[in-house]
Image (tube, coloured by chain):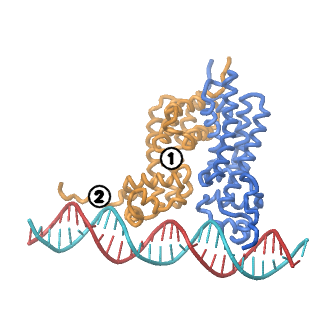
Chain colours: A blue, B orange, C cyan, D red
Amino acid sequence: MSARKPPASTPLSGAAEPVRADIIAAATRVFSERGYHAASMDQIAQAVGIRKPSLYHHVRRKEDLLFAIHEQLIDELLDETTRAVDAAESPADAVRGVLRVALGFVARHRDAVTVFLQERSAVTGERWTELVVKRDRYEQMVSGAIADGVAGGRFQAVPPAMAARAVLAMANWGYTWFDPSGTMTSDEVAELFADIALKGLEVRQH
Amino acid sequence: MSARKPPASTPLSGAAEPVRADIIAAATRVFSERGYHAASMDQIAQAVGIRKPSLYHHVRRKEDLLFAIHEQLIDELLDETTRAVDAAESPADAVRGVLRVALGFVARHRDAVTVFLQERSAVTGERWTELVVKRDRYEQMVSGAIADGVAGGRFQAVPPAMAARAVLAMANWGYTWFDPSGTMTSDEVAELFADIALKGLEVRQH
DNA sequence: AGTAGCCTACCGACCAGTCGGTCGGCCGAT
DNA sequence: ATCGGCCGACCGACTGGTCGGTAGGCTACT
């Protein structure tokens, strides 16, 4: 064919043109309910209100949907957390902020968080690497704050990376049980978890 | 050996005759690597060293494998944790024991724990109910220990169910990052996490 | 000892159904 | 008359699961 090959290249590193928001929302819902592999493109199309071939008008591959969900979430999370940590006046404040942001995400973007945490390994290739880089940056922000606390003598001498894992675990695990219509708001839970992580469960009698 | 007929009857409710151990091991490996839905029975058969139809000689359905993995893990976990909590001399000791057992499982049965925590929703029907019952019993054991601590005035006045979630989160999330060949053993991590949960990160100056 | 019968474990060939993905064409708005 | 959004019809690949049959070990009876 004489026809010049269309651009056909991903415009930039990773980032393709944005997928329509309602499609991402529908995919997020379906993926979170049935899991990435068990969800079919037909089911997603139905959730959008169109047929499968039309869905392929907006997305090149199924994996693109999964990646878009992952990327959107980590970018927003990174952004909000950075702001919270920067605004913190003490390491303890930073830990509180991290927990508040993370649990807020669980509450507000429940399905997306579920997909993000449960379908981590379904993203492949260099796109996965891209996500890992951002995830590492996120974790290092948390362990950095804790390291500051240790260095300043305000935290116990714990390995910061380990403590960060403990803190993040409390937040991440929330997608498993948190109920937005439950008795506690995400901020209340965040405060409670921060208290536990910072002050501990045991009563100190001095 | 005289020709005594083997039991050959379904011994109890639900429990079918046990699936050959190497098959469960292979399925655990494959499921944890690729995810339940992405894993094919052929891949499992190959991991065992037989062909797919032979695999169906030992298992009725794919889901049976998943259920067997889940059941085996939760039964053992429930058992070990019960012993640890019963042997504890204080609520704080109980929390330490729970973390030690749970993180020990992560270290020793990494793949099974991964399947258990990541493929929870793939089990369906009444078998799922059965698992939920046991999981709840497990969680209540932990929150019960914390409630004891609160009632005895040795723990802060936190909602026990919430605190239990924080503690379990630290342990469960371990399957995400724990490396058995890393610098810390699972017992060391458990001790560190217990210290954080019980005493907190902040230094108290009185 | 020989042998008939049975049973477990295994396999090649196969099936119906589903999946991700494509193609050519329709339609309404610009 | 072009074009973005949409769709019916279709395809190849693969999946979970089945079926008929085989190899070989154990038992029981002769």
Quick one: A8 or A84, which is closer to the camera?
A: A8
Subunit bearing disc 1: B
Kind of residue at badge 1: Val
- Few, some or many residues within 10 Å of mark 1 (<14, 14–19, 20+): many
Q: Residue at x 55, y 49 (%)?
A: B117
Q: For marks 1 and 2, give the CA distance.
A: 31 Å
User: Percent from the top left, x then y, of residue A158?
Assistant: 60, 27
The residue that disc 1 covers is B113
Q: Residue at x 62, y 44 (%)?
A: A173
- Few, some or many residues within 10 Å of mark 2 (<14, 14–19, 20+): few
User: Percent from the top left, x then y, of residue A14?
Assistant: 71, 53
Q: Residue furthest front?
A: A2
The residue that disc 2 covers is B7
Kind of residue at badge 2: Pro
Does the residue at mark 1 contact the one at mark 2 (Cβ under 8 Å)? no
Query: Looking at the image, can residue B155 be seen?
Result: no
The answer to whether D3 is drawn above or below residue A123 in the figure is below
Q: Residue at x 27, y 58 (%)?
A: B6
Is label 1 in a helix, a strand or a loop? helix
Place residue A11 in its image quadrant.
bottom right
Is label 2 in a helix, a strand or a loop? loop
User: In what quadrant of the picture does the N terminus of chain B appear?
Assistant: bottom left
Q: Residue at x 52, y 56 (%)?
A: B129
